[in-house]
Amino acid sequence: MSDDYRAERVLGVPGATEFPSGHGQPQRRGYRAYADQRAQSRLSFDERAADLGLSASRLTPEVLEAIAPLLGELEALRAQVEQDRRRMAAADRAADRHSLVPCRNRRAFVRDLETALREGEPTGTLAVLHVAGVELLRRVHGLTAGEGALRHICGVVLGSVRETDPVGCLGGSDFAVLFVATGIDQATVKMEEIVGRLAGQPFTWLGLPMSLMPMYGVHALLRDEGAEQALAAADRALCRRTG
């Protein structure tokens, strides 16, 4: 018996450079796949060198392989920083929103008002809106009815002003609107329009219209006054209108 190994290929068993084609027949794998893999590795190498601010000719594959773990950690840190940045931005937006109605809370609105007062000569008008009857509605019909009334009021106000005019809920059934670059006469006309819409579109609960009474006051922003001073002045104007 000869000790020589047989050189012929056994049928049905592909060689080292072959793989089945799906039809039971062996198919030779070309060298293009290996060339594409080298090109892909080269592209990745060039990109990593560019990330380090170096040309590929100055960064050898050996050096890149040695610092690869550091590059991986750097990329992970970048991803974590971006994730934290997005989380903080979302938290800031949530912190500025009122917990019940779709507008700014008092803190965010006061910040916007302070910004408007610091911009040289103020040209805007501040309006405060108080809607009487919400608390009574809450006591008689429950918390859900009172919250629904507040959302109804806020929707009417938001639908009546420009997107550039900040709207805030100061607490309870008190709202405020900052009419940017608007005189007090124009702001008064707009507030009359809002009051008219609230009267023409009453809040209904269980099919019955609820009696709500909106009142407002307006104040032209003054130079060197603070946000709380402006709010107090607008509130005094409201009291004079209802007194």
Image (cartoon, helix red, strand yellow):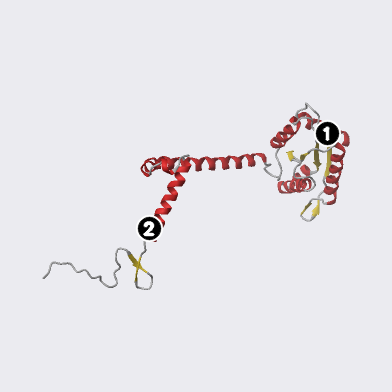
* Res. 220 image quadrant: top right
In the structure shown, which secondary structural element does the residue marked by tag 1 occupy?
strand
Q: Residue at x 70, y 34 (%)?
A: 111
The quarter of the picture where the N terminus appears is: bottom left
Asked if residue 181 lies left or right of residue 106, the reply is: right
Q: Looking at numbered disc 2 in the image, what kind of residue is underneath it?
A: Tyr
The quarter of the picture where the C terminus appears is: top right
Q: How many marks?
A: 2
Q: Which residue occupies the foreground of this view, 87 or 130?
A: 87
**Relative to 195, does residue 13 appear above or below in the rendering?**
below
Q: Identify the residue position indicated by label 2 in the image.
A: 34
Query: Which residue sits furthest front?
Result: 57
Please state the horizontal and vertical placement of residue 145, each as a whole percent of the image: 74, 49
Please state the horizontal and vertical placement of residue 77, each as a whole percent of the image: 48, 40
Residue 159 visible (yes or no)? yes
Q: Which mark is residue 219?
A: 1
Q: Residue at x 60, y 41 (%)?
A: 89
Q: Residue at x 45, y 42 (%)?
A: 55
Q: Nearer the viewer, mark 1 or mark 2?
A: 2
